[in-house]
Image (cartoon, rainbow, N blue to C red):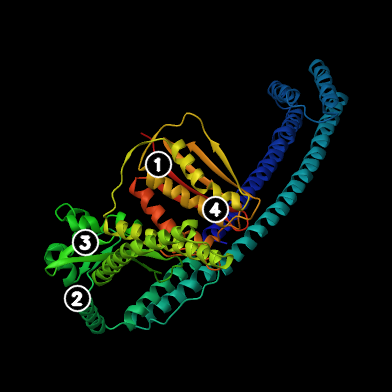
Amino acid sequence: MKIKTKLNLGVGLLFILIIILSLVSAFYIFSIKKDTQNILKANYITLEYSRNMLSSLDKISIDEEKAMLLFETNLEKQLANITEVGEDTATYDLQKNFELLMKNRTDEMIKAQIRQNIFEIMKLNMKAIKAKSDTAKETAETANLWIAIVGTLCFLIAFNLLINLPNNIANPITELTSSIKEIANKNYSQRVNFTNHNEFGDLAKSFNTMAQKLEEYSSSDLHKLSFEKKRLETLINNMHDPIIGLDNQHIVLFINDEALKILGLKKEEVVGQETTVLALKNDLLKSLISEDFETKKIPLKIFADGKESYFQKETVTITITPTGEEQRVTIGNVIILRNITIFKELDFAKTNFIATVSHELKTPISSIKMSLQLLENSATGTINNDQKQLIESIKDDSVRLLKITGELLEMSQLETGNIQLKMEKSSPYEIVNYAVEAVKVQAEQKNITLQLELEEFLSAVRADSEKTSWVLINFLTNAIRYSTENNKIIIKLSNENNQILFKVIDFGKGIESRYKSKIFDKYFQIPGSHKSGTGLGLAISKEFIEAQNGTIGVESELGLGSTFYFKLHTV
């Protein structure tokens, strides 16, 4: 429980009890005062009147007129102050006897009767005084009891606060004071251990965090830190890859010589400056802070060292866990430009080699196919069944080789940028029909039904119909290859957000989720699949569609089949 809550409860309860004690005391004091006033007003004054009447009755013989006037005055006051039971009868009897005395002032019998009446009145009031005194006494005793009870409760609570509250406050403060003195004496290993979930617990946690940070700072060597800083700067400057360090506000913290060289800037112009401001005057830096190169992994072509060089941008996010905290926070980023020029040159060499080889192989393979056609012609002579099987086998292999060389040639043209797209207004229905006709025989061989689901009145697309048909044929060929016999393949055509969506849905074995991100990579083939191609078909398809500003993708669940699709913009 919080100290403030304890104080509020203890003092608040004590305050309430004091108020109750005051109210009880005031109530009973008022009751006793009321009882006392009743005695004075109702009984004591009557006794005074009675004594005055007795005194005046004795003085009748001395000064008759004055005595009779005094008696009459006190009698009238008594008549106005009748308060007890039976007092009225005695008072009225006294009044009648006084009237008789007024007529016969020397009659001793009447005087004796008057004295008897006065004594009766005095007796009644004396008895009432005693009863009211007993009542006042009982009221006083009750008041004492309640005041004692409430006072005892107040005492117990005050005593408990007196014993416990100072210790609850003073002991942690004493321990904290002692720990602060230890910290002041550079004993940074000192800790306070308050397990209570109150203000002192929070204070202890903050104090321990402070002590831990002071201990870390104390254990560090500023000279060592300075030396390590210089060594790190030297290491970064001697790296062949350009490196730029930024904080979480995109302010440049450090930059090596290689980065300054390709940016064409000086260190004092960059360090401490915000990248968004620098990017206004430096197009290369503007490209570096752009997210396009991060998401699309586009290599940067930079003229450096007297030649064109290629760099791959890599951004490393720097996160730390602050002392005394649990969550990691980002404190900045480091931009690293990997020099991939040598790999790019090797890639160009590989591409040119593949293009050359593919081009050179197409001619002899075509000659082989023509020779096979001549052999199959009966005019060249008859062949037996074994020879016919060999010719078919050579024919299949030559077709496969021709397809592979065609794909390699297409890919090399894509990589070198030599491929030309014939963008024109094309009918999506014609593209689908052409692709279906191209694979119809292949589907019939496995008894696979090609089911068309085409929306009506779709707009034309701006595309290279030949390349787009090639992509759709590639999708259908793969779907037929990986579908079981007596199955079906669905070809869908629909409008989606002013784009025409081409879909090929098969019900084969599907693709594992870990391979879906790599399915459009060059030369990639799913492990365990029937490898009858180069692994370039889908990669080429991706390049063809994206070159037409379209999008391509795949949806698949293992065991449920796959859906390959691409979208093209309408005219």
Residue at coordinates 67% horizontally, 59% vertically from top-left?
A: 152
Foreground disc of the pair 3, 1: 1
Q: Quadrant of the N terminus?
A: bottom right
Left or right? Give the position of 135 relative to 521: right
Q: Of callouts 3 and 1, which one flags the residue occurring earlier in the amino acid sequence?
A: 3
Q: Is residue 518 visible?
A: no
How many angstroms separate mark 1 from mark 2 (CA)?
48 Å
Foreground disc of the pair 1, 4: 4
Instruction: Estimate the x, y position of residue 570 in percent, counting from the top left.
Output: 38, 35
How many angstroms separate mark 4 from mark 3 (CA)?
39 Å
Q: Pointer 1: residues within 10 angstroms few (<14), some, or many (20+)? A: many
In this view, the residue in front, 295 or 63, is 295
In this view, the residue in front, 311 or 99, is 311
Foreground disc of the pair 2, 4: 4
Instruction: Estimate the x, y position of residue 561 in percent, counting from the top left.
Output: 59, 53
Residue at label 1? Answer: 568
Dot label at residue 479: 4
Asked if the residue at tag 4 contacts the one at tag 2, i.e. Cβ–Cβ closer than 8 Å, the answer is no
How many angstroms separate mark 2 from mark 4 (CA)?
54 Å
Question: What's the residue type where badge 3 is placed?
Answer: Lys
Instruction: Estimate the x, y position of residue 14 in percent, counting from the top left.
Output: 60, 55
Q: Height in image: 250 above or below 390?
A: above
Count of marks placed on residues = 4
Q: Pointer 3: residues within 10 angstroms few (<14), some, or many (20+)? A: some
Asked if the residue at tag 2 contacts the one at tag 1, i.e. Cβ–Cβ closer than 8 Å, the answer is no
Q: Of callouts 4 and 3, which one flags the residue occurring earlier in the amino acid sequence?
A: 3
Element under disc 2 = helix
Residue at label 2? Answer: 237
Q: Residue 178: which quarter of the image?
A: bottom left
How many angstroms separate mark 1 from mark 4 (CA)?
21 Å
